[in-house]
Image (spheres, rainbow, N blue to C red):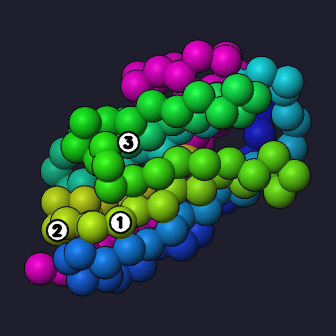
Amino acid sequence: QVQLVESGGGLVQAGGSLRLSCTVSGRTFSSYSMGWFRQAPGKEREFVAGINWISNYVQYADSVKGRFTISRDVAQATVFLQMNSLKPEDTAVYYCAARFRSTITTTQTSYDDWGQGTQVTVSS
């Protein structure tokens, strides 16, 4: 089990940028992957981006490709989500999740630990 703490959310105008951070602590494994999910009011939680901690392989939802970038800093045990060209439809609570497998999956039930979430609001 690991502990995940997100930060960096806030209010931004459409077209603006935000960078989310997720700091990982506790028990770590040599092979696992991290994901960012989001949940808008009245909607189901959805996959946004994922990264393999060791290989740095990344995967994105179609809705954020070309606008969002996921990355990790192994030394800082932190995963980032750089969000550019933000749209009002990106408004949601963003969650960081850890999966103790090397393969990235878009299925939220496949992730083992979750952060508390951080609110991102994009105004039009």
Which dot marks residue 109? Answer: none
Q: CA distance from mark 1 to mark 2?
A: 12 Å
Q: CA distance from mark 3 to mark 1?
A: 14 Å
Q: Residues within 10 Å of mark 1 (few under 14, many from 20)?
A: some
Which residue is at the front of the view, 52 or 107? 52
Residue placed under numbered mark 3 in the picture: 48
Q: Is residue 117 above or below residue 72?
A: below
Which residue is at the front of the view, 121 or 51? 51
Viewport quadrant of the N terminus: top right
- Name which of mark 3 and mark 2 comes first in the sequence: 3
Q: Going 27% across and 67% down the picture, which residue do you hit? A: 85
Q: Look at label 1 and name its amino acid.
A: Asn
Q: Going 41% across and 79% down the picture, which residue do you hit? A: 10
Segment tinted magenta in the rendering: 97-124
Q: Position of residue 23 (x, y in %)?
A: 72, 56
Q: Look at label 2 and name its amino acid.
A: Pro
Q: Does the stretch in magenta take in 58?
A: no
- Name which of mark 3 and mark 1 comes first in the sequence: 3
| Circles 3 and 1: CB atoms closer than 8 Å | no
Q: Going by the image, does 91 lie left or right of 71?
A: left
Q: Say which element carries label 3.
A: strand
Confirm whether residue 29 shows in the render: yes
Residue placed under numbered mark 1 in the picture: 84
Q: Does the stretch in magenta take in 102?
A: yes
Which picture quadrant has residue 14? Answer: bottom left
Q: Look at label 3 and name its amino acid.
A: Val
Q: Going 38% across and 36% down the picture, which residue do you hit? A: 60
Confirm whether residue 112 shows in the render: no
Q: Is residue 106 above or below residue 113?
A: above
| Mark 1 vs mark 2: in front | 1
